[in-house]
Amino acid sequence: MNVKLTKEQITAIAEAGIKVSQKRAENLLSTDAGLWAFSPEDLTLILRIANATYRAGVPVMSDAKYDTLYVRELEEQDPQSEFLASVEPEPVMESKTVALPVKMLSTEKAYTFEEIERWVSRLIKSANDINLDLSELNIRVTPKLDGYAAYDDGETLYTRGDGSRGQNITRAFDRGLKVAKGGQRGSGAGEIVIRKSYFEDKLSSYFENARNIQASIIAEKKIDERIQQAIDDEACVFYPFKLLDAWVGGCKEFLENFESILEDMWKSVDYEIDGVIAEATNSSLKSYMGSTRKNHRWQIAYKVNAEIAKVIVQEVIPQTSRTGKLTPVALLEPTKLSGATISRATVHNYGMVKAKGVGKGALVELVRSGLVIPKIESVINSVDPDIPVECPSCHSYVVWDGDNLFCPNTTDCPAQAENTMIHFFKTLRNVDGFGPRVVEKIYQAGFKSIHDIYEMNIEKFVEIGFGEKTSENLVTQLLASRSLEIEDWRFLAAFGVPRLGEGNCEKLLAHHDLNEIFKITIDEMIAIDGFAEISASTIHEGLKSIEKEFQLIYKLGFNIKESKRSELVSEQFLSGELIVFTGSMEHGARPDMEAEAKSLGAKIGKSVTGKTTLLVTGKSVGEKKIADATNKGVRVISENEYLGMIKKS
């Protein structure tokens, strides 16, 4: 395998303080020799490189390979390794370190059930040592989130760093990051994560993995508009460990039901996880067992063994989505991984196919961990790939947009039309039976739009090949979907306008009636908090393209529940103000004050620019910041002056 480091990976290695030449790093990562051929020093260097790039969002290897191959080999060769005894650092390169309010340790890892049994035996022995009744020895099990570890004390959000010193990343909350499950700030340790379903649906075309996004959320540089939208949609959240759903029970029950507990935990959250965390709940036992420099002895992480295989690609085929994007799917030599036979895997996009040489005859590394969908981890032997020049569905010539290929035939492409229909019924959520196969059969019979389907009767369904009873059920479902109450934002989201998902539909319809949306100008949309110029322009064009179909369906008489209207921005007290809050506030946490200002019609900025109209200062604000704002013509007032001003409203 010939590894070539990217500029981003080289930067991450350098900024983590790892002194190694690019050539040596690439040679270490490229070797096909067995891991036994590496010295402990080589293994440690590889692990440090892998850790630095992983934390920076540009990993050189999977978490699974890191844990199950390299860490395991170092444990075998050098059990007393200083690297193994220390908390693996989570650097944020741009910031200085600060002391953490509490120590944040790593978690001891287990990869087999036998290791879990030995850990439980240690718990029982320790309980006996302190004469603790075993009926009081309970174990709490939670999903092991695969995100970015952080600690929130209510005022500051910290990275884990080296366990004792981390970095201040409160800017993530300043950008609108929320606590999961409606939780409050100050909930302690947790992870910054993104919903898997949201990532796959909205971001996987632009970002190779969720780690890219997690690293961007906490970075000092300006974040991508799409990531900001994910924050606004609360798809990216800070998830405190204490708020996770948990299984709690005795040691015997834990061991007897381990497999089912693992499966239940895996399904309990819509976030990436790579195992479960098990911990004793009794405080006296935890105090007695204590911790090493690296881990709490009363806690363990069971990481699902990831299986890795080298597989030959038989072919890469394109599939056209409802938005016209061509998704490359690799057909593979059938390979058994984690108990399942894998014969296909989705490739990120055609930019990746082209850059990494994924095509017929390529040798790739395939990874699957537990219930996780398999993915191509790396390309060992690349080829010159075949890049499609036309849409596989309608044969229109395709066009490049960044790293993606698109079919521009939005009106007559069967794949786009079929997938649009499927998306409509899936999003509506009040009609059963109209899955992909049923919709495909209806489309191929000549019914090309959603309103065509709603006008079908039992005879029409029977005529195109459905049974009498099935046809009756389909018509019944269509009638029911029109009579059952549905929120206006869900109805609008069902049409699949790009950049107009359920969250943005809610925001839009909080200010405008459903009947008015096709009259909204781009400027009016931008005036609503959460809509930037680029997304507003995309949505505006998208609304034009669905207007005719929307009106035909709307006239069928759906039972639509209107959103509660927010007060028009133009009528609000802070209308027209672009406010930046800075410093430590007494009235409330900065995100709460920003939310309050938004409710009064203001737009919120994260830094002072020439467009800022008001800088509200709390405690500990530097004179330079105030002077810079004044020089830009920005009005500067104290927190108390601001509070007095809004009370008059």
Image (tube, helix red, strand yellow):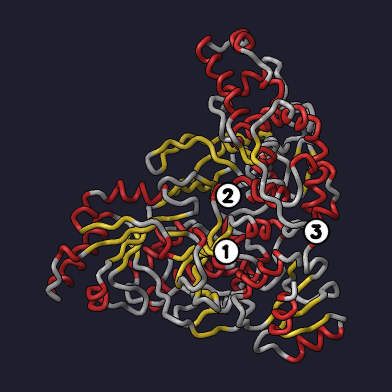
Question: Horizontal and vertical percent for residue 511?
Answer: 74, 52
**Callout 2 secondary element:** strand
**Measuring 79% from the left and 70% from the top, which residue is drawn there?**
578
Q: Please, what is the three-letter code of the amino acid marked with disc 3?
A: Ala
Viewed as shown, does residue 193 lie left or right of 284?
Answer: right
* Viewer-proximal residue among 73 and 371: 371
Q: Name the residue located 49 percent from the left edge and 56 percent from the top edge.
A: 32
Q: CA distance from mark 1 to mark 2?
A: 37 Å
Label 2 belongs to which residue? 379
The N terminus, quarter of image: bottom right
Observer-nearest of 563 and 116: 563
Secondary structure state at the residue bearing disc 1: strand
The residue pinned by badge 3 equals 527
Say which quarter of the image contains residue 444: top right
- Residue 240 spot, x, y in % from top left: 46, 65
Q: Is residue 599 left or right of residue 130?
A: right
In the rendered view, tell whether residue 466 sits above or below residue 4.
Answer: above
> Mark 2 or mark 1, which is nearer the start of the sequence?
1
Q: Looking at the image, is mark 3 or mark 2 earlier in the sequence?
A: 2
Report the front residue among 113 and 642.
642
Per the image, the residue denoted by label 1 is 178
Residue at screen point 31% across, 77% down? 291
Q: Dot 3, how many residues are within 10 Å of its Cα: few (below 14), some (14-19), or many (20+)?
A: some
Residue type, mark 1 in image: Lys
Q: Which mark is residue 76?
A: none
- Between disc 1 and disc 2, the foreground one is 1
Q: Amino acid at mark 2?
A: Val
